[in-house]
Image (tube, rainbow, N blue to C red):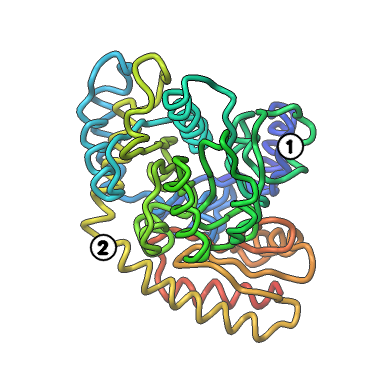
């Protein structure tokens, strides 16, 4: 356990060595247990951020730790020139719960997005015999920071410094089917969207919109790509959020909670999209190695055995009721949105200061989603008692 002086010295050193792309909070987290984090001075924080929706099983889970420790003693990496059993096991489980047909493991959600974009373009190339195809994305979306993923992220603030980006990307209004139809032409090869927009402010798709886009894609021979990187892996109360809507994507993206902290993502495809790419069309050095796939396999196994989905629905409903009451108690709260354990409160002012104050004074980890929205994406194993403790601290901060 370090002193305040040691903490500041470490923070100062971090400012010297890190490339300055984050404005970090002045907290050094040292360890975690259950749904709590502990800083370098020994202070306990109730975590409602989960490392940005990553730590679905919480921290220091004994079974998860044991599985990864065992795999470290066997094999960490062997490349995709060979098979490895953890990847086969994880792939089989992931296909079963997603109802998809083929999987490609990546190192991150952003890389999964890149792979999905390539599937859409390659599918259209195979169909038409030429390139030059277009993709429709959504305004206020977020799909990642690489140039391809950034190209389909509907936020001018993120895009402008890095222009020109990928050509042939058009942006429709989320939950406005007519705006999507207006952009479709003979060059359109796919539509990409988050089933629940995360960074854009916690906006779930409406059933009418999602079913309408699915029908449009089938009618015009386009691929429907659903980004489940944040809203998937049980966070909505369904293993993947689209499963509540009665639709089925051609390509689906997963990451974040898939590895519970170990960096692993995946893109999954079915039907016409499952055979679009062949040998040489895509690859990765680290993606799908035995260590990360043992993590994913363990997460999927524990989700099923511990009935995580049922738990999320129950506690998510409780969180909804509690946040509804918070919204009624405070005029500055303008809206409450979300599903399961992915919810947000929209305020009439920027919330960055409120988040900082919660961290430093109330020992509560909160994160924002855009300037005016506080995002609640805790570990999926939180209890109703944890929700009560969170709301008590949140009320003090507001």
Q: Secondary structure at mark 1?
A: helix
Residue sitting at 26 percent across and 22 percent down? 75
Indicate which label's residue lies in the foreground, 1 or 2: 1
Residue sitting at 68 percent across and 63 percent down? 373
Distance between mark 1 and mark 2 Cα atoms: 40 Å
Q: Earlier in the sequence, mark 1 or mark 2?
A: 1
Residue sitting at 78 percent across and 62 percent down? 350
Q: Secondary structure at mark 2?
A: loop
| 79 to 209, vertically: above or below | above
For the C terminus, the image quarter is bottom right
Residue 283, horizontal then vertical, whole percent? 41, 19
Q: Residues within 10 Å of mark 1 (few under 14, many from 20)?
A: some
Residue 291, horizontal then vertical, whole percent? 32, 30
In the rendered structure, are the residues bearing label 1 and label 2 in contact, judged by CB atoms less than 8 Å apart? no
Query: Can residue 23 be seen here?
Result: yes
Residue 71, horizontal then vertical, whole percent? 26, 30
For disc 2, the marked residue is 307
Residue 198, horizontal then vertical, whole percent? 58, 55
Q: Is residue 48 left or right of residue 23?
A: left
- The quadrant in which residue 74 appears is top left
Q: Is residue 48 left or right of residue 288?
A: right
- Please tell me the numbered disc located at residue 159: 1
309 and 191: which is toward the camera: 191
292 and 225: which is toward the camera: 225
128 and 75: which is toward the camera: 128
Residue sitting at 74 percent across and 35 percent down? 12
Q: Residues within 10 Å of mark 2 (few under 14, many from 20)?
A: few
């Amino acid at each position: 356990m370090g002193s305040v002086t040691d903490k500041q010295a470490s923070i100062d050193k971090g400012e010297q060595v890190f490339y300055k792309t984050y404005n970090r909070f002045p907290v050094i987290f040292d360890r975690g247990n259950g749904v709590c984090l502990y800083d370098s001075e020994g202070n306990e924080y109730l975590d409602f951020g989960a490392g940005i929706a990553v730590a679905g099983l919480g921290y220091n889970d004994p079974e998860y730790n044991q599985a990864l420790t065992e795999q470290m003693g066997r094999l960490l990496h062997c490349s995709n020139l060979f098979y490895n059993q953890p990847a086969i096991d994880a792939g089989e489980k992931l296909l079963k719960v997603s109802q998809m047909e083929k999987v490609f493991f990546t190192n991150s959600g952003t890389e999964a997005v890149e792979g999905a974009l390539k599937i859409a373009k390659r599918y259209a190339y195979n169909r038409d015999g030429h390139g030059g195809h277009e993709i429709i994305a959504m305004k206020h979306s977020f799909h990642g920071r690489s140039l391809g993923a950034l190209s389909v992220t509907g936020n001018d603030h993120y895009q402008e410094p890095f222009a020109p980006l990928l050509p042939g990307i058009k942006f429709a209004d989320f939950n406005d089917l007519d705006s999507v139809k207006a952009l479709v032409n003979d060059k359109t090869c796919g539509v990409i969207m988050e089933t629940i927009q995360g960074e854009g402010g916690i906006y779930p798709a409406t059933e009418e919109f999602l079913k309408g886009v699915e029908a449009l894609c089938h009618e015009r021979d386009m691929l429907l790509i659903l980004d489940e990187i944040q809203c998937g892996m049980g966070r909505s109360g369904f293993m993947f959020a689209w499963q509540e809507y009665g639709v089925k994507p051609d390509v689906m993206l997963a990451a974040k909670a898939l590895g519970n902290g170990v960096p692993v993502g995946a893109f999954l495809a079915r039907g016409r999209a499952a055979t679009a790419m062949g040998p040489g069309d895509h690859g990765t050095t680290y993606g799908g190695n035995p260590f990360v796939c043992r993590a994913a396999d363990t997460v999927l196994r524990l989700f099923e055995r511990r009935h995580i989905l049922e738990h999320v629905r129950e506690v998510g409903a409780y969180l909804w009721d509690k946040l509804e009451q918070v919204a009624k108690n405070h005029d500055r709260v303008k809206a409450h949105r979300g599903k399961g354990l992915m919810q947000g409160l929209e305020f009439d002012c920027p919330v960055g200061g409120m988040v900082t104050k919660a961290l430093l004074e109330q020992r509560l980890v909160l994160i924002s989603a855009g300037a005016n929205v506080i995002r609640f994406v805790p570990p999926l194993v939180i209890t109703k008692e944890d929700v009560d403790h969170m709301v008590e601290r949140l009320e003090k901060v507001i």
